[in-house]
Image: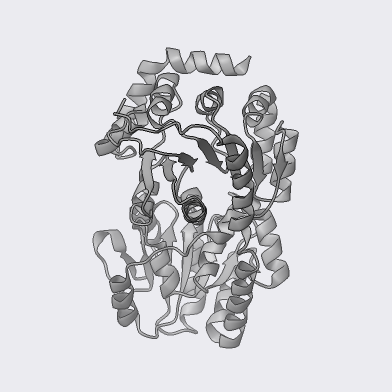
Amino acid sequence: MMLPLYRLATDLTGPFIRLYLAQRRSKGKEDAARFDERLGKSSVPRPSGRLIWLHAASVGESQSMLPLITHLLTRYPDIHVLFTTGTVSSARLIAGQLPDRVIHQYVPVDRMAYVRRFLDHWKPDVALWAESEFWPNLISETQARGIPMVLVNGRISPRSFAGWQRARGLIKSLLQNFEMCLGQTQGDAERLKKLGANRFKCVGNLKFASPPLDADADELARLQSLLGDRPRWLAASTHAGEEEIAADVHRALGGRHPGLLTIIVPRHPDRGPEILSTLSGSDLSIGLRSRGDQPTPETEIYIADTLGELGLFFRLANIVFMGKSLVPLGGQNPLEPLRLECAVLHGPHMANFKLMAEEMAAAGAAVTVGSATELAEAVGRLLTDADARTALITKGREYVSAHNAVVDAVGKEIDQVMAIRCQKPNRGSTSHAAA
């Protein structure tokens, strides 16, 4: 009953959806040059032959899908991949990373007219959905056309599970459309089962196979030369409240580590001026990257509020605190700094990566801190004790390496669907004009 009501609501509110999208477009939250893609239109023809459609919501999901895309292109040399995402930031970050035979498009807004236009044009043979991007119209219409779907790296956090309990009928009807639901963890697989998935399992977490974040080599060399051997540490993907903690840590350690540089990369770069304003009342010398400031010898805190440069700063500072974890917001992905051989610290609030954080703690691959005082003690110890820092980095590298087989395991599950459901004439034997 909820699905028909949802469909009716999205049909009736069409003018309001267009107004909402226009407002997002005016604020730069939609890609003006490719806005029609959000309405299901495309100027890109569908390639002939078989087409696998893979959808990932945003930046993190997109990065974790890149190794799977490479696997599919190698395994099926005659196929093309349609890769959809929903955010401008994800499109920008993956723009230079997609191999040949991959087409990027923005996913259509979940209104039936847009969904049908999108599917009429692309006619995918198989659809792969990443993590927890459950759009009712898009899923149900894909299934109605007989296109097999697989949920890869499915993620249902305890909080999301509780929320879906209030819409059990809807989520059950959506999950039952998937040939297989692959959970990131065994806990995710169990929650998918309880919410109604017919087939479910866990074969590993694709986030372990994500490539290291990119960095501009010339800019890296320039900043390394500029900073020399200055002691430094990084507070990455921070949220409100954690920047003040980073400043407190700097005050606690600055006297013992002359020339110390604290780098802050906020999770949302547009918060840079706000962070600068918050910290400006202190006695610290602060630089803001978005306004062109460079880290001079006098700079004590450097706010790197630019998009897509986290990989650069992971390479510049091998002592990293991962944010969103000293505030009760669930944590950020600790694998990103581990892949770039950083000594990783995080707070106690890691609900979004609970199993990963537990495994890393057991493996000695990360350090959990519970307060600003504990963070200062841990950063100070790693700045002083090179052996302790090297040991933590080594354990992190070993932890990541132990999970590298996940792409093949996920690929085998997709192979089964391809073998069973794709023994039929090509859907896209000829190119299609834009809808």
Q: In this rendered view, identify the residue nearer to me: 194 or 386.
A: 194
Q: Position of residue 292 (x, y in %)?
A: 24, 63
The quarter of the rendered structure image containing the N terminus is: top right
Q: Is residue 45 left or right of residue 245?
A: left
Give the residue drawn at x 64%, y 38%.
160
Color scheme of the displayed model: one colour
Can the viewer see residue 111?
A: yes
Q: Position of residue 18 (x, y in %)?
A: 34, 22
Give the residue drawn at x 36%, y 47%.
91
Q: Is residue 352 left or right of residue 278?
A: right
Give the residue drawn at x 39%, y 24%.
114
- Up the image or down, 109 lies above or below 259; here it is above
Q: Quadrant of residue 150?
A: top right
- Up the image or down, 152 lies above or below 212; here it is above
Q: Position of residue 378 (x, y in %)?
A: 60, 75
Q: In this rendered view, identify the residue nearer to me: 270 or 413.
A: 413
- Up the image or down, 79 lies above or below 361; here it is above
